Image (cartoon, coloured by chain):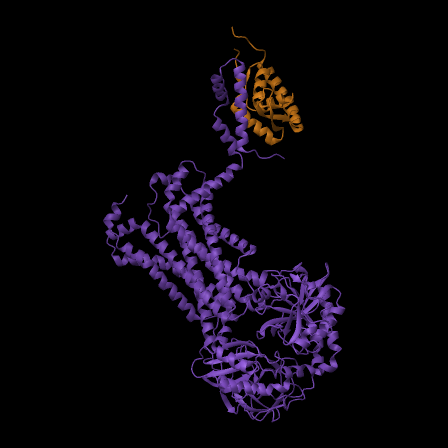
Amino acid sequence: MSTRVPLLQGTLDLLILRTLIFGPQHGQGIARSIQQQSEDVLLVEHGALYPALQRLEAKGWITAKWDISSNNRKARFYTLTRLGRKQLAAESSQWRALANAIGRILGPETTKS
Amino acid sequence: MFHRRKPEDFSAELRAHLALEADRLRDEGLNDIEARRQAHLNLGNLMNQEERFYEASRWAWLDQLRQDIRYSFRQLRRAPAFTLTAVLTLSLGIGATTAIFTLIHAVLLKSLPVARPEQLYTAGDAKHIGVYSGMAVDWDIFSYDLYRHLQDHTDGFEQLAAFQGDPRRIGVRRTGSPQAAESYIAQYISGNYFSTFGVPAFAGRVLNADDDHPSAAPAAMISYRTWQQKYALDPSVLGAPFQMNGTPVTIVGVAPPDFFGDALRTNAPDFWLSLAMEPTVNHGNWVTNPQLHWLYLMGRIKPGANIRAIEAQMQVEVRQWLTSRVSVLGPTAAAQIPHQTLHLRRAASGIGLMRANYSTGLELLMAISGFVLLIVCANLANLMLVRGMARRRETSISLALGAARSRLTRQALTESVLLAFIGGAAGVAIAFAGTRTLLAMVFTGASYIPISPKPDLAVLAFAFAASLITGLVFGVAPAWAANRANPLDALRGAGRTSERSGSTPQRTLVVMQAALSLVLLAAAGLLTQSLRNLAAQKFGFAPDGRVSVRIDPNLAGYKLDQLEPLYQRIKERLSHIPGVMSASYSLYSPMSGSSWTTDVSIDGQPPAAVDGQNLCAWTRIGSDYFDTVGTRILRGRPILDSDTATSRHVAVVNEQFARRFFPNQDPIGQHFGAREKFEKAYEIVGIAEDAKYYKPEQPVMPMYFIPRPQVTPYDNAGTMSFEARSLYVNDIVLRFAGRAGSVDEEIRRAFAEIDPNLTVIWIQRFDKQVANQFSQPALIARLTSLFGITALLLASIGLYGVTSYSVARRSKEIGIRVALGADRKQVVAMVLRNAYTLIAIGLALGIPLALAMGRVMGSKLYGISWYSPAILAGAGIILAAFALVATIAPARRAASLDPIQTLRDD
């Protein structure tokens, strides 16, 4: 099993928005998708996920409605709004700039012997 | 933009998550139980999740309120004695205020039950009542001719209606009914009366312009109340012929149940007749004589019309009309034409008849009940504070355990507002009962009470607001105390302190209560003394053992030449009733609510320059009149049987008349008359002592008494009309040996014997008739006393509470003092000193307030000045005495403390 790292403060919102760009998804699906796309590196704490969804919904970046999941269960599906899309674009470029800058400071990764 | 989510929805989402996650874990190969356990673990504490969602929503707020209310109920149940006291005091305070408000609302605020009442305007303020024939100056009463003139020439009204300002009794009998005619109130109205109000008939049709025509078939409308009470909603009344004062009239419609006419009045009309019916039914000339003013106006303005413009136009029209009649009016009146004016007033709540009579009294009562409510608030705040102190430990523990101060404050306020609402609900019940009693007292002797005691929406809203405000007012202090509680007290063992008597807010409240009680006691004292003066004044006649009987031979169709035999027969027949010492009659008896007045012209003196300058009351009387009512003749002779229609015209005048017109001469042998050029009409033959005929609080007017049948042929149609009408004297007065018992039957039988068509309008004992004139001041004095005593009791309870509380808290200190050698007297003196300091401050604040209150009441007082040191001192002494009673028990308790015991405690 590979090492899992907890999410950095403030990144969960960005990842949720990013996940929803592919279409409506429910909470469990979002958590699952983040984990898979990061190749199981990022661990989404389920306990933090729902308050985050709540927050994003309140900000109007996502909307929600009850629907049936692929395996036939009722679930609350979240959809990205136009406002959410804009927010995603802004936050993504910010994040990239930040990651680049930090990467340059830290330099290339050294492998432990 | 988005709907607040319910907690249930959030829980459902979490459950869905668990199911989906378990599905996934199963797919990865875990067994069912393991998959579910893992899903739960991943999510973390479910409860915690839900809690976090919930905290952030407003549902928490509502739920906390529910908790607060439930908690408050629990607290109140735990202290039933406190709760009962609080609810009782509150219900008294709120109930009294609401009862008074019910009256204020009905008399001063409520709109007429008609279409768009805000468009209604009337002319003047109904100062003139009845039939008037002078220059009204600020015109509020109009003759038919003047009404038509205004109607034809004023542009701004959609409609302008006129109606009899003072509806009177007529004899009514259903044609073919075996019963004798009964007396009912009828009002003459213009044909557009109902359409001006926009009021449709409840059944049948309303009177219209076609009915208001001399040649129209005689038609009348009946009020729903009369239809219900007298005819049991019998549908055959519609279209049925009735005899009204002997004239056949058909009932064409019933007015709506809530319609009571153009004003709140105790003589609310039972029947409406068109103005054109007045000559036949009333046997009068009110419609045809342009000089007789007896109609009030009610106009519905056109939307957007300018009131000031209409008013200005009408002022000009009144002067024009008067100018066109100068030849009839005479030079004195003509000179006054430029001073005649008219003012339009809003009439959404009708003509202000009762407003004028009751507004000051009601406002005074409202202020007083407001004071009582304030005292109730102060008292409850005190009780709550004491409770708060007792619960201080509890509060401190709550704080120590992490309760938010804001939550505790809210809890305290919730409790007081809840109490106030319970008290308010009970108060509405008390108000209902109270209003009923109030109404019965306000309208003593009235055949009809125009106000319903049932609380309507406005009254309920008032009670609700009063409760809420009360709850907030008396809850603020305890809430503030809760907010200031110190969590450390919980650890220290709260409740041990040696601070001086009570806390500052508590002492302030006692001071306030003492001050307010003083104000109310002083007001009650002033009003009671004023009432006593009113009732004990020298009336100039003897109310005891006299009975007055009101009749109206005009209504029974008597002609002028039939009157003398009728009155002689009445006098003769009634004298034979057992126990009757003498019988006589007059146009109106003293304190019957009627008054006839005129300007007189004295022989050898210049005539009145303006209307009302030589105003005198006058009446027509029979022989033996002065003996029968108990008025002494001071000089000369009374009216005798020998004063007939053809004998020399004579008059008896009262002292006031003599003083006013003959200050330096002997009035006997002098002459006067009711108009210029008729100065020789009557010769004064006697002087009677001053007697009050009209309002008991007004000074006696100059008055003259003339023999019933002596008529002066005046040259003026208006004066002549009064002259003719005054021959039909209304009041028969009987003097009994000793007290008049139940003589009604005897009297009715006598009248039935004389003429069954002669309707007896009322039979009244004189003392009752006099007392009726004080019913309003008596009511106000009694209520103020009642409120004053309530306030005093509440203040005493408050003082008792604060004193016993402070004694309890200072027991240790007192114990030490006693142990150090203070004797019992010193301890008692110390406690009393503390209590009396509060009372003294209360007095210091209350005295200027009481003086201000007296100043405001000044105009309502009779025979006593608003500045009455005796009454103020009396109120202060009563307050001090009650304070002594309230503090003596706690003081003795303090004195009997066992020092060893108190020091050993804790």
Q: What percent of the width, then of the height, locates residue B826?
A: 28, 58
Query: Count the marks: how many?
Result: 0
**Is residue B310 at least partly visible in the picture?**
yes
Q: Which chain is purple?
A: B
Q: Which residue lies furthest to the top in this view?
A: A113
**Is residue B855 at least partly visible in the picture?**
no
Name the image quarter holding residue A19: top right
Q: The orange chain is which one?
A: A
Q: From this view, report whether residue A61 is shown above or below residue B196.
A: above
B252 or B651, which lies in front? Answer: B252
Q: From this view, report whether residue B99 is shown above or below residue B398.
A: below
Q: From this view, report whether residue B543 is shown above or below residue B395.
A: below
Q: From this view, report whether residue B625 is shown above or below residue B127.
A: below
Q: What percent of the width, then of the height, locates residue B333?
A: 69, 80
B442 or B636, which lies in front? Answer: B442
B665 or B204, which lies in front? Answer: B204
B570 or B44, which lies in front? Answer: B570
Q: Quadrant of the C terminus of chain B?
A: top left
Instruction: Decide if residue B428 is on the left or right side of residue B802.
Output: right
Instruction: Decide if residue B352 is on the left or right side of residue B899.
Output: right
Q: In which quarter of the image is the N terminus of chain B?
A: top right
Q: What percent of the width, then of the height, locates residue B420?
A: 46, 51
Q: What percent of the width, then of the height, locates residue A28?
A: 56, 22
